[in-house]
Image (cartoon, rainbow, N blue to C red):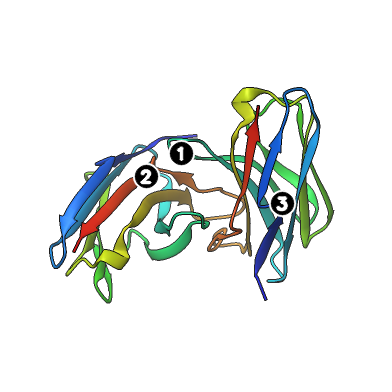
Amino acid sequence: DTAVSQTPKYLVTQMGNDKSIKCEQNLGHDTMYWYKQDSKKFLKIMFSYNNKELIINETVPNRFSPKSPDKAHLNLHINSLELGDSAVYFCASSQTTVLNTGELFFGEGSRLTVL
Amino acid sequence: QQQVKQSPQSLIVQKGGISIINCAYENTAFDYFPWYQQFPGKGPALLIAIRPDVSEKKEGRFTISFNKSAKQFSLHIMDSQPGDSATYFCAASKGSGYSTLTFGKGTMLLVSP
């Protein structure tokens, strides 16, 4: 069983469209994240949810809207897609304790290409 | 977020050699320093991590060296193998609560046969 699974793995779409990426983790973790990895491999945090509650929202256009229906799922919806949104989007999860945020477990990524 | 600076951007090492990747940080509140390994088409995975109460941590062929006063830490891969070819990311975070990891920009390592 895959620990952190994302769908779809590949997504090719036209500028202006709306698309969603889904993420599920079966590790029982309480914190989930979305990271964006650009063409230069730079990993940048976008959002973080703890027990379905948004706790971190980095400087991300409001065209990006995360949604966490329960603590095992974190979806990412993107409106009005732009060329610059082309990237690999990684979902991750961790178990947060008082001491630290714990090891991040990443999904395999969703490669979004906007034409 | 405070930056974590990683170098080199890319590295070619011969099989059996030592690969060394360096990172420097600015935020003295950071107290957790992991290294992640990413193979093409996969997500990053934790390789090894250190906290500042020790200056070195070794797991198999992988060693982290940590210099608190210089605010630097490095990954050493001994007896590098072609299977080690991947992108390596250093990262840092504050220890408590909901602190997220700040990643370096990554180092693409190629180990030639």
Residue under pointer 1: A42
Of callouts 1 and 3, the N-terminal one: 3
Percent coordinates x, y for residue A103 in the rendering: 53, 63
Q: Which chain letter goes with mark 2?
A: B
Q: Position of residue B110 (x, y in %)?
A: 26, 54
Q: Front-most of A43 and A12?
A: A12
Residue pointed to by mark 3: A8
Front one among A100 and A68: A68
> Is any atom of residue A59 visible in this view?
no
Q: How many marks?
A: 3
Image quadrant holding the C terminus of chain B, namely bottom left
Residue A92 as seen in the image, left or right of residue A19: left
Q: Is label 1 in contact with label 2 (beta carbons under 8 Å)? A: yes
| Label 2, residues with CA under 10 Å away: few <14, some 14-19, many ≥20 | many
Q: Are marks 3 and 2 on the same chain?
A: no
Q: Secondary structure at mark 1?
A: loop
Q: Residue at x 50, y 48 (%)?
A: B101
Residue at 35% x, 37% y: name it.
B26
The disc labelled 1 sits on which kind of residue? Phe
Q: Quadrant of residue B63?
A: bottom left
Can you identify the residue that label 2 sits on? B106
- Residue occupying image coordinates x 17% and y 55%: B13
Comparing A34 with B50, the one in front is: A34
Amino acid residing under circle 2:
Gly
Answer above or below: position of B48 versus A60: below
Q: Is residue A90 above or below residue A115?
A: below
